[in-house]
Amino acid sequence: MFLSTVLADFGKHHRAALLRSLPQIELTSLLGTTALELLAEAPDAGPKLIALYRANASADVKLKLLRALRKVPQPAVAAFLRDEFGRPTEPNFRGAILVSLAACRT
């Protein structure tokens, strides 16, 4: 928990550098979680997060991306989430999809 807090503070102060380094960051790591959360706050986050979701085979990374999409209440994101919910997927993905879809409705 302490390390997550430190990384979140680091991300707040070095957002641009961290996002520039996104291709080199292991997204399964705590730093990867911080980077994805920062990316989710960007104005063009929806298409970028969806592209990362489609490009990654790791279930852990996909779950993090689904959770990050809750910060992106856009119609295109909601459509993507509805499509993903209709596909056969892991049970914990469904929960993350529903949480993110609920955030799109507010």
Image (cartoon, rainbow, N blue to C red):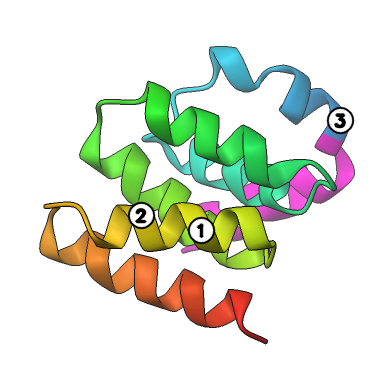
x, y (%) of residue 74? Answer: 69, 62
Which of the pair 93/78 is nearer the observer?
Answer: 78
Residue 45 covered by magenta stretch: no
Q: What crowding class fits label 2: few (fewer than 14 Cα within 10 Å), some (14-19), or many (20 or more)?
A: few
x, y (%) of residue 50? Answer: 52, 39
x, y (%) of residue 58? Answer: 25, 31
Q: Which residue is mark 2?
A: 83
Q: Which residue is mark 3?
A: 16
Q: What crowding class fits label 3: few (fewer than 14 Cα within 10 Å), some (14-19), or many (20 or more)?
A: few
SS class, disc 1 = helix
x, y (%) of residue 67? Answer: 46, 60
Range shown magenta? 1-15
Q: Which residue is mark 1?
A: 79
Q: CA distance from mark 2 to mark 3?
A: 31 Å
Who's the residue at 81% across and 46% down the image?
42
The amino acid type of the residue labelled 2 equals Asp
Which of the pair 44/76 is nearer the observer?
Answer: 76
Judged by its main secondary structure, the magenta piece is helix
Quick check: marks 2 and 3 in contact, CB under 8 Å?
Answer: no
